[in-house]
Image: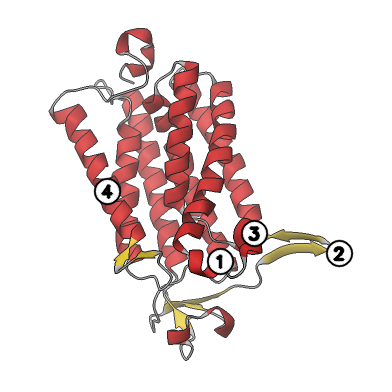
Amino acid sequence: MLLAFQFQSPSPILFELGPIVIRWYGFLIASAVLIGVTLSQWLAKYRHVNPDLIGDLVIWLVIAAIPCARLYYVIFEWQEYAQRPGDIIAIWKGGIAIHGAILGGTLATIIFARIHKTSVWQLADLVVPSVALGQTIGRWGNFFNSEAFGSPTNLPWKLYIPISNRPVTYLNYEYFHPTFLYESIWNFLVFGLLLVLFFAGLRSAKKIKVGTLALVYLVAYSFGRFWIEGLRTDSLMLGPLRIAQVISLIMMGLGVWGLIWVYRLKHSLPDVISRSSSVDLDEF
């Protein structure tokens, strides 16, 4: 069958030489950051934004997003980490949450935009395509760690999980939904959509509003994450609720309302600077 394929992680370790150990998870995150910086700086030129500003912003984003992503995950898995507190900082073993990264990155972007007196929405538009592409790459770290998989499946496409990584309730099952792959593909489609909108907005006689790409990202990414999360066996929970699904619904709602606010009601998005203080708030 054309669509029949089986995944199995070869190892979480990419390279090992004596005490030096390079893990796939860390390598992929680092690669995603470097590729994202290059992409966002390239896009910045089309919107007449100094690429160096994006380079400075990325430092803020890394400092804020990665620790917040880890803290978010640890908080909801505290019962596990309370028993082995030494693993709290062991980010190379996996265990970061994209919603924590988004929250941390958003706060860092707002502070950065205020300091540099530029539009936070302009910066967000230039960053979100890189975020989507970074998520596309980063999800493969879950594959190499044999984590973030879905429920058992007999579909032609499936992921083999070693018994040591299986939930207790599924010890007798070998194959699971490759939810890392589902989300990686979805994120790549979101990335493609954002690039199409970006360049279509440059060529179109009717320019798109600043902030549109950020709002579309909230809606598109969250829509896919909501249904993919429903397949996973390791969701972060708050009582009976899957936290990622709750946050996804909130993000979708904010994104839809923002698009209605801008295009239907013809209002400007709230920003850290006034419209009269910068051309960043014009259409592009």
Query: Disc 2 to disc 4, how far (Cα)?
Result: 47 Å
The N terminus lies in which quarter of the figure?
A: bottom left
Front residue (pair 99, 278): 99
Determine which residue is flagged by label 3.
Answer: 90
Q: Residues within 10 Å of mark 4 (few under 14, many from 20)?
A: some
Mark 4: which amino acid?
A: Ile
Residues at discs 1 and 4 in contact (Cβ within 8 Å): no
Label 1 to label 4, Cα distance in Å? 29 Å
Image: 27 above or below 180: above
Give the residue pinned by disc 1.
82
Q: Is residue 223 visible?
A: no
User: Where does the image place residue 265, in percent across and percent down from the top left?
Assistant: 13, 27
How would you rate the neighbour count of disc 1 (Cα within 10 Å): few for under 14, some for 14-19, many for 20 or more?
A: few
- Residue under pointer 2: 18
Q: Considering only order in the chain, which callout, 3 or 2, is on the residue closer to the N terminus?
A: 2
Residue at x-position 43% and y-position 18%: 118
Q: Which x, y percent locates residue 67?
A: 56, 47
Could you tell which of marks 2 and 4 lies nearer the N-terminus? Answer: 2
Residue 122: tell me if it is visible: yes
Tell which tag, 2 or 3, sits nearer the viewer. 3
Mark 1 vs mark 3, CA separation in Å: 14 Å
- Check if mark 4's residue and mark 3's residue have beta carbons within 8 Å: no
Q: Nearer the viewer, residue 46 or 248?
A: 248
The residue drawn where x is 51% and y is 47% is 68
Which color scheme is applied? secondary structure
The residue identified by callout 4 is 250
Q: Nearer the viewer, mark 2 or mark 1?
A: 1
Please determine whether, in this image, residue 247 is positioned above or below residue 44.
below
Q: Are marks 2 and 3 in contact (CB under 8 Å)?
A: no
Mark 1 / mark 4, whichever is N-terminal? 1
Q: Split into 4 quadrants, where in the image is the C terminus? A: top left
